[in-house]
Every structure is written in structure tokens, then in C-alpha cells.
Image (cartoon, grey):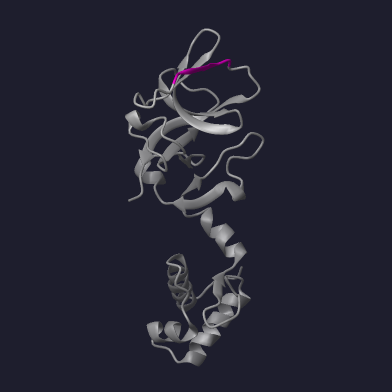
Amino acid sequence: MGPLTHKQQRMLKFIEGRLRENNPPSQREIAAHFGLAQNAAYQLIGYLKKKGYLTSSGGHRGLRLSGEYLKSSRHTQGVPIVGRVAAGDPILAEENVEDYVNIKELLGLSDNAFLLRVSGDSMVDEGIMDGDLVAVEPAGEVESGRLAVVLLDDEATVKRLYIRKNRIALKPANKAAGYKTRYVKPTEKDVRIVGRVTACMRRV
């Protein structure tokens, strides 16, 4: 992708903002926002397309961010939100990443950290609800007693992990539901510690 002038950068950010609101702007609206003649707005949009930042799906409001720009910008925008973790898949594979958020410095996260969307109610007594995001620092080993993400039977689960002599205890936190602690051997092929949980967030 080619470098952008200041005007082109401003227009791209405006279009990107509208698209993220699911409200694609028309050429007329872009021109009005920047106080430009429609021909001038059309020319700037053309430059953004030529340089690889925008594409068009046709129609009155057909402007879209290019795949190349989306891919490059995502990796500079923060911590990835992972919707699923499965055995054999790279955790941060493109198809697993839902979005990116700028919280790395706020939470003091490493460059390898990611956010995992929690599924289920097994940890509600720890304040972790269905749909919450937990910050995960990847690690093959986790200290006993820590909250951790463990890949179990091809599914990522958040539990408090306790290390025993020859097994690992995965303790849930939902007394009302009666979930039981599960014991597994660390050598089992379907068991893998993904990392330790360092924070929990909820979108409101």
C-alpha cells in the first residue's frame, strides 16, 4: 500500500469510522463532511482505492476497507480477541480473531497476550460471566492456584488450576450449578495449558 497525504489520511479515518459504525458514507456525505466539491472527494477516494486502502462493492454506499488494509491495521491496533481455541490450530489464526482492542499498556500485557471470550457459567463465583473477555498470557506452565486457560477435549476452558503429584485439578466456581472439579493427567494428549489469566473484562 502506498503512503498517504494528510488529506487522504483524514478521509480514510472518517470512512473507517463510519464503516465501523455499520453506516457506510456516500460520496456526497464525504464531500459535505470535508467541505469539498464532489469531484474533489471523488478524486481523493480514487487515490485511496489506487493505493490499496479502499475497495468498492458497488452502489451508492459501496465503499469498503480493503482486506490488505484491514490485515495490516489490525496488528497495530492492540490485543486480539479470540473467540475460540482448538487443538491443532494456531491460537491467533486469522479466522479465530474477532477484533483488536487497545488495552496492552493499560493492563501491562506482553506482545504475545490475547483476550479470550468466555463461554459458559462455570466461573461465575469468581466474577467471570458468560461472554466476558479474559486476558491471557501464553505459558506452557502455570503456578498452582492460578486462574488458567486449559485446552481440554479440543475446547478452551477457564478454571482455577491446582497441580498435584501426578495430575492437574481444574476447579470451577459455580456452587449453585454444582459443577465438579475435574482431574486430568498433564501427559494426556488432549490436555494442554494455554496460559494464565491476568484480568477479566466485560463490555457494557
200 versus 3 height, above or below: above
Residue 128, x across and y down, in percent:
37, 35
Which residue is at a point 61% across and 71% down the rendered structure image? Answer: 52
Residue lying at the far front in this picture: please name it.
Answer: 177
State the image quarter where residue 58 is shown: bottom right
Left or right of 55, for residue 162: left
Provide the residue span drawn in magenta: 180-185
State the image quarter where residue 29 is shown: bottom left
Q: Nearer the viewer, residue 160 or 135?
A: 160
- Is 186 magenta? The answer is no
Which residue is at a point 57% across and 64% down the rendered structure image? Answer: 69
Q: Nearer the viewer, residue 76 or 82?
A: 82
- Is 181 magenta? The answer is yes
Residue 60, x across and y down, in percent:
53, 83
How many labels sit on residues? 0
Residue 181, x across and y down, in percent:
45, 18
52 versus 154 height, above or below: below
Q: Nearer the viewer, residue 152 or 80?
A: 152
- Work out which quarter of the rendered image holds the N terminus and state it: bottom right
Left or right of 4, for residue 36: left
Residue 199, x across and y down, in percent:
37, 36
